[in-house]
Image (cartoon, helix red, strand yellow):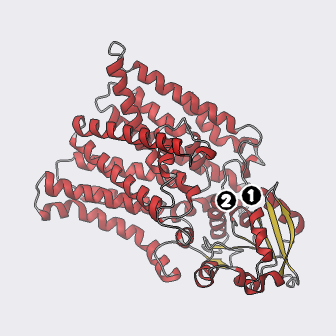
């Protein structure tokens, strides 16, 4: 029943239709990916801006999967969203069963407490943050499921004593490559897995180097072959194996700027039923509590695993832990966009949830010996219930605001389809208005190059075909800037804080076309 409710929640935009279909789950960046997917389906390749600007600012596997609804509907922007929701719901369901499988291997290897793995899966499936992340129009749900699949396959490989046949090498290599294509961050996972695998062979098993190489190299080479077309495309066409979206996000980053939000974002996955309100995330008491709870639960869990679990489980958890450390370090120290930290860390949620349930189970056994795990099961079930209540709150009017539809509405009312519009945030606008040019460089290499060479895009906008700039309120400040002759070329015609909207128009418009 609870699983069915979570599934219906993911599908309710399909049932209710517009505006929920286009606004409830879909994010700004999600619409960027959908724009590229639709253009691919329409024969325009991986591109934005009505097919005129090639891009690699997306994750490839999810983008290719998202082309399917547009192929089916002939590119219809509204009807295709039904298929998009179904795809995201499908990989969320897959993630649910993969979380349960992983939790069973760790929490209940002997099959004595089957309720705990199901509770772990339900907490993942019904966590308000994770529901939004896995249904956001991006690759997060697919990537999370791929990470779990790699770890479960790795555990099976660790348990095998016989030499691996080519079917095993091929299967694991393909899965590893698929994880990379789901999101490039999977390189951290693969480094962690193969490092632990090598340590196991060389230091624990004390196998000869030739034996270890024969065990791990074939699947590693296969994973590289799977990832190679995307990497070569990025390098040859765009000059870097990193997609332009990643480069754009990290351009303004300062070393360590995200460390302050990291403890709270991790805490929200250890306690998925307790999302922290945004105004409290950067307060010192909340950071201190989040840090103490997260480190305490993680330490308890690791001590338990490394003293009581089997060798394969210990090694698999170690690989997961190293992956988590690398992801946290990269996004905490070297990357920008702190508002996306929760999404970047989402693949770590299953490990955090399982760790919390491990501690809860230990406390239940020690404090209520006569009742065994029943208090842990009751507490976990209550946490699932709290998740459901919080999901219900998101259905209240105004609780879940897409944030960009006011820009789309203004453009639809005031700008002809033939005119070119620009924005820093072009995901939602670019989906609904084809002739939209991205200015932050996430999907626009030209704007990214302008940011690199000039420090801003003002001169780029002045010399471009852009007639309107429509975005959030803060962009209105550009109207007073003189760089590149911007203030002489564009005038501010709309500027409101609620709804957040700023519109600038070229003083002498281009001819339509």
Residue 100 seen anywhere in this rendered image of the structure = no
Q: Secondary structure at mark 2?
A: helix
Residue placed under numbered mark 1 in the picture: 404
Horizontal side of 173 relative to 211 (left or right) equals right
Q: Secondary structure at mark 1?
A: loop
| N-terminal-most mark, 2 or 1 | 2
Residue 360 seen anywhere in this rendered image of the structure = yes
The Cα atoms of the two marked residues, 2 and 1, are separated by 7 Å
Q: Quadrant of the C terminus?
A: bottom right
Residue 245 locus on image (x, y percent): 56, 69
Asked whether the residues under the numbered discs 2 and 1 touch, taking CB atoms below 8 Å apart as contact, a structural biologist would say yes
Query: In which image quadrant can residue 443 be found?
Result: bottom right
Front residue of this view, candidates 200 and 181 = 200
Residue 334 locus on image (x, y percent): 46, 65
Question: In this picture, is 260 found above or below 494?
Answer: above
Question: In this picture, is 131 found above or below 81?
Answer: above
Q: Give me the residue at 50% from left, 35% from top.
A: 123
Q: Give me the residue at 63% from left, 34% from top.
A: 390
Horizontal side of 309 relative to 88 (left or right) equals left
Q: Give me the residue at 69% from left, 69% from top.
A: 424
Horizontal side of 85 relative to 183 (left or right) equals right
**Residue farthest to the top?**
370
Front residue of this view, candidates 485 and 85 = 485
Residue placed under numbered mark 2 in the picture: 28
């Amino acid at each position: 029943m609870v699983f069915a409710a979570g599934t219906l929640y993911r599908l309710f935009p399909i049932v209710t239709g517009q505006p929920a279909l286009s606004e409830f789950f879909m994010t700004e960046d999600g619409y960027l990916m959908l724009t590229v997917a639709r253009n691919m389906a329409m024969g325009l390749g991986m591109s934005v801006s009505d097919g005129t600007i090639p891009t690699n600012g997306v994750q490839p596997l999810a983008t290719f999967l998202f082309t399917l609804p547009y192929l089916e509907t002939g590119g219809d922007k509204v009807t295709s969203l039904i298929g998009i929701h179904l795809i995201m719901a499908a990989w969320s369901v897959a993630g649910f069963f993969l979380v349960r499988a992983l939790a069973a291997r760790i929490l209940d290897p002997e099959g004595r407490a089957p309720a705990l793995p199901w509770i772990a899966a339900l907490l993942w499936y019904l966590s308000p943050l994770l529901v939004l992340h896995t249904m956001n129009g991006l690759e997060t749900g697919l990537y999370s499921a791929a990470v779990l699949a790699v770890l479960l396959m790795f555990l099976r490989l660790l348990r095998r004593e016989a030499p691996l046949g080519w079917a095993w090498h091929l299967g694991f290599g393909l899965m590893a490559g698929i994880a990379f294509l789901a999101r490039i961050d999977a390189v951290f996972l693969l480094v962690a897995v193969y490092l632990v695998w090598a340590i196991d062979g060389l230091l624990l098993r004390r196998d000869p180097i030739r034996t270890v190489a024969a065990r791990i190299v074939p699947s590693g080479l296969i994973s590289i072959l799977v990832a190679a077309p995307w990497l070569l495309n990025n390098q040859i066409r765009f000059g870097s194996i990193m997609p332009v979206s990643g480069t754009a996000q990290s351009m303004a980053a300062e070393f360590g700027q995200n460390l302050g939000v990291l403890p709270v974002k991790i805490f929200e996955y250890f306690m998925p039923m307790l999302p922290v309100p945004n105004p409290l995330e950067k307060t010192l008491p909340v950071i201190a509590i989040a840090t103490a709870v997260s480190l305490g639960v993680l330490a308890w869990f690791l001590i338990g695993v490394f003293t009581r679990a089997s060798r394969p489980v210990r090694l698999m958890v170690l690989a997961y832990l190293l992956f988590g450390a690398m992801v946290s370090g990269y996004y905490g120290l070297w990357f920008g966009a702190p508002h996306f930290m929760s999404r970047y860390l989402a693949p770590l949620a299953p490990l955090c949830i399982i760790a919390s349930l491990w501690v809860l189970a230990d406390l239940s056994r020690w404090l209520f010996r006569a009742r065994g795990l029943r208090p842990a099961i009751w507490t976990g079930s209550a946490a699932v219930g709290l998740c459901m209540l919080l999901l219900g709150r998101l259905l209240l009017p105004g609780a879940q605001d897409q944030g960009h539809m006011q820009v789309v509405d203004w453009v639809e009312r005031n700008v002809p389809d033939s005119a070119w519009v620009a924005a820093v945030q072009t995901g939602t606008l670019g989906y609904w208005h084809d002739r939209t040019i991205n200015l932050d460089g996430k999907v626009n290499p030209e704007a990214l190059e302008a940011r690199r060479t000039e420090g801003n895009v003002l001169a780029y906008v002045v010399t471009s075909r852009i007639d309107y700039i429509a975005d959030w309120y803060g962009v209105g400040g550009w109207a007073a800037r003189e760089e590149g002759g911007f203030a002489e070329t564009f005038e501010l015609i709309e500027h409101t804080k609620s709804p957040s909207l700023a519109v600038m128009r070229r003083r002498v418009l281009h001819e339509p076309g």
